[in-house]
């Protein structure tokens, strides 16, 4: 009996490793594609900001593994599936700003369940240029991905003139939930909850931090926690720092 249970446990562990291993390989392939952005992606800026995967890799099951639950809503189209994730902005107290700063993200999957498009809110178009986006996505192509820590770390591969400033973040995301000031830096903290698709879904919280240099208000680093996933981008590099080393840990 004990031997049979051990065999079952080993089988379950092997299955889990194979599943997460596939997700990890898909993420590595997306990272590789990002480093050669123009050949693998397209950015559309009509009515909304859209990232198009020219050579789709990620599957619906990969997205569910990353977010730990399904979309807020789903509908079928002639092209495949349309998933919507809504990130609801959280405030430390009563809402004290005008406008809607929730972030709805729409994902279009082909009929083979591969992710074809990610669509962002229209307001992003007013403050985000194509060149800046391409720089940021390319930077992710040289990120260090840790399977064990479920994290990705990258450096912004651009020039000092391209680094976003504090007002840029305020225009796109609105007021932060908290502001933490020190002698040298100012840190904006944003909190979001993923809107549930059904009552039985578990809570999924997102925490995003932006650290600015006091004086010039330039972004120095951006950090995000999406459930158990950790993302980090270092903006404190000059234009000559074009290192493209991205190793796996």
Image: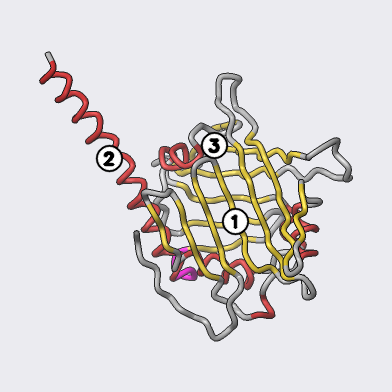
Label of residue 77 in the image: 3
Q: Position of residue 51 (x, y in %)?
A: 56, 57
Q: Quadrant of the N terminus?
A: top left
Question: Relative to 1, is 58 on the left or the right?
Answer: right
Identity of the residue drawn at 60% across and 32% down: 72
Crowding near the residue tagged with mark 2, few <14, some 14–19, many ≥20 C-alpha atoms within 10 Å: few
Q: Position of residue 31 (x, y in %)?
A: 42, 61
Marks 2/3: CA–CA distance: 33 Å
Which type of secondary structure does the marked residue at label 1 adopt?
A: strand
In-front residue for pair 2/246:
2
Q: Which residues are magenta?
A: 36-40
Task: Examine the image and state in which quarter residue 245 appears.
Answer: bottom left
Crowding near the residue tagged with mark 1, few <14, some 14–19, many ≥20 C-alpha atoms within 10 Å: some
Magenta segment main secondary structure: helix
Q: Disc 1 designates what residue?
A: 223
Q: Position of residue 7 (x, y in %)?
A: 14, 25
Q: Earlier in the sequence, mark 1 or mark 3?
A: 3
């Amino acid at each position: 009996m004990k031997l049979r249970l051990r065999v079952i446990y080993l089988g379950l562990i092997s299955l889990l490793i194979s599943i997460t291993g596939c997700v990890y390989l898909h993420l590595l392939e997306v990272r590789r594609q990002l480093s050669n952005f123009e050949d693998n992606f397209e950015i559309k800026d009509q009515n909304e900001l859209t990232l198009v995967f020219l050579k789709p890799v990620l599957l619906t099951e990969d997205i569910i593994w990353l977010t730990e639950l399904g979309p807020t809503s789903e509908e079928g189209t002639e092209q495949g599936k349309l998933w919507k994730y809504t990130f609801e902005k959280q405030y430390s107290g009563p809402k004290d700003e005008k406008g809607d700063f929730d972030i709805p993200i729409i994902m279009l999957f082909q009929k083979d369940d591969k992710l074809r498009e990610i669509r962002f809110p229209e307001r992003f178009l007013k403050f985000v240029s194509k060149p800046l986006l391409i720089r940021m996505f390319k930077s992710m192509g040289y990120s260090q991905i840790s399977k064990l820590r479920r994290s990705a770390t990258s450096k912004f591969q651009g020039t000092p003139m391209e680094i976003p400033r504090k007002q840029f973040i305020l225009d796109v995301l609105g007021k932060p939930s908290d502001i933490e000031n020190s002698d040298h830096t100012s840190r904006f903290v944003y909190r979001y909850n993923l809107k549930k698709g059904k009552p039985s879904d578990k809570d999924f919280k997102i925490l995003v931090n932006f650290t600015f240099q006091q004086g010039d208000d330039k972004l120095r680093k951006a950090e995000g926690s999406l459930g158990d996933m950790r993302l980090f981008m270092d903006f404190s590099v000059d234009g000559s720092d074009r290192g493209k080393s991205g190793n796996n840990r």
